[in-house]
């Protein structure tokens, strides 16, 4: 199998003068649970600074006021909560209905682990007609069952860190780290998805093309930085980039925001909420 190595960044046109928010799409982020409301806030910020026209955050009602207060630009959607404060399986109908008007979805950050999430995630993966980013607990929920998934209606971008990827394919972290490119390409090819294997030199592949992201630094090894990437890639999907291009540009902008943040605030001093703040600087280097 010959793999095309991509080095050039994808093209996103500059905004035309008469553009309006509808031009840049609606992103729905389903994230967060009790104790992890920050994951929803960070993914939402990533989507906003990624240029989405409108960002909806769907989460359990318990944390909704916290999420709404974190960012006035969010639209919020209350889901159904189970007794542990996780999203209940019955949230599927709400998400299915609200997805209809969306350009892209992102699911999983801060969901936690619970029984209902397995069938919920599987149903969303198979039934939602929009492109979708799956991260963190959405990937944990599907671990071991990728072979049984039906073919989705639109692009699926999966953004595991090495630990999540190891769980997904029933391997271990050191095997994954020793074979980052081969295992990513193999998975993406077999399951017809875009795989973003995070960590130093993030690998992005759709099974035919591959790129290793040159931006980013160890200052980004701090809780919540991955959640920002999830929202950012969803925003790029909403603006019309195809899944591989959205993942490639998202990883590049995210890492560059981290490099700009580290230059000003140091690597140890970098925190996840710095990344959305430094995304405008990264965008300036793109255009
Ligand atoms: N060099 C470059 N980039 C790095 C480096 C590094 N040394 N270390 C981390 N990063 C980047 C990764 O590429 C990725 O984009 O920081 C981000 C870290 O993302 P995650 O590993 O998903 O971490 P986090 O956001 O804290 O995850 C939050 O979700 O994935 C679960 O278990 C995780 O509960 C945690 C939550
Ligand atoms: Mg993560």
Image: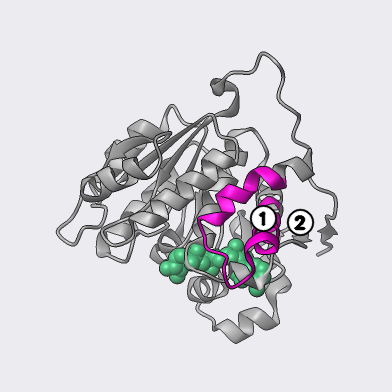
Q: Main secondary structure of the magenta part?
A: helix
Q: Which residue is mark 2?
A: 208
Is label 2 in contact with label 1 (beta carbons under 8 Å)? no
Q: Based on the picture, tell me whether residue 42 belongs to the magenta stretch.
A: no
Instruction: Give the residues drawn in magenta, as a range.
Output: 253-282
Give the quarter of the image for residue 57: top left
Quadrant the N terminus occupies: bottom right
Q: Residues within 10 Å of mark 2 (few under 14, many from 20)?
A: some
Residue 176 sits in quarter = bottom right
Q: Is residue 15 visible?
A: yes
Name the residue rendered at 72%, 71% in the picture. 181
Give percent across and percent down for residue 159: 56, 60
Q: Is residue 207 above or below residue 10?
A: below
Considering the image in quadrants, where does the C terminus appear? Answer: top right
Q: Is residue 236 left or right of residue 231?
A: right
Which residue is tagged 1? Answer: 251
Q: In what element is the residue under mark 1? A: helix
* Disc 1: residue Cβ within 8 A of ligand 1's nearest atom: yes
Q: Is residue 258 magenta?
A: yes
Residue positioned most to the front: 264
Residue at 49%, 57% (x, y): give it. Answer: 227
Q: Please say if 62 is above or below 185.
A: above
- Is residue 37 toward the left or the right of residue 273 in the image? left
Q: Position of residue 215 (x, y in %)?
A: 74, 61
Mark 1 burial class by Cα count in 10 Å: few <14, some 14-19, many 20+ = many
Figure quadrant of residue 11: top right
**Residue at 54% in and 47% down:** 46
On screen, residue 178 versus residue 87, left or right, reads right
What is the x, y in percent for residue 143?
44, 68
Residue 59, given in percent of the width and then of the height, sits at 31, 47
For residue 131, say whether it is visible: no
């Amino acid at each position: 199998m010959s793999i095309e190595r991509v080095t050039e960044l994808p093209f996103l046109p500059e905004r035309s003068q008469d553009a309006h928010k509808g031009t840049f799409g609606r992103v729905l982020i389903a994230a967060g649970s009790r104790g992890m409301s920050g994951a929803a806030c960070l993914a939402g910020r990533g989507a906003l600074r990624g240029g989405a026209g409108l960002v909806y955050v769907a989460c359990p009602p318990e944390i909704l006021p916290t999420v709404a207060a974190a960012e006035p630009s969010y639209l919020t959607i209350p889901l159904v909560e189970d007794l542990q404060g996780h999203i209940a399986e019955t949230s599927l109908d709400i998400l299915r209905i609200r997805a209809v008007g969306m350009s892209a979805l992102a699911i999983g950050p801060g969901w936690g682990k619970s029984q209902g999430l397995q069938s919920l995630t599987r149903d969303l993966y198979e039934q939602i007609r929009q492109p979708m980013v799956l991260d963190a607990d959405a990937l944990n929920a599907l671990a071991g069952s990728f072979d049984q998934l039906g073919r989705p209606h639109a692009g699926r971008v999966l953004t595991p860190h090495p630990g999540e990827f190891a769980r997904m394919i029933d391997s271990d972290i050191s095997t994954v780290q020793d074979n980052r490119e081969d295992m990513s390409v193999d998975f993406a090819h077999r399951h017809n998805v875009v795989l973003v294997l995070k960590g130093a030199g993030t690998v992005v592949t759709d099974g035919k093309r591959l790129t290793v992201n040159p931006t980013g630094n160890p200052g980004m090894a701090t809780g919540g930085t991955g959640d920002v990437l999830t929202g950012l890639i969803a925003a790029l999907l909403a603006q019309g980039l195809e899944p591989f291009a959205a993942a490639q540009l998202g990883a590049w902008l995210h890492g560059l925001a981290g490099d700009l943040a580290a230059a000003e605030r140091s690597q140890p001093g970098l925190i996840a909420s710095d990344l959305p703040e430094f995304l405008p600087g990264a965008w300036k280097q793109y255009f």
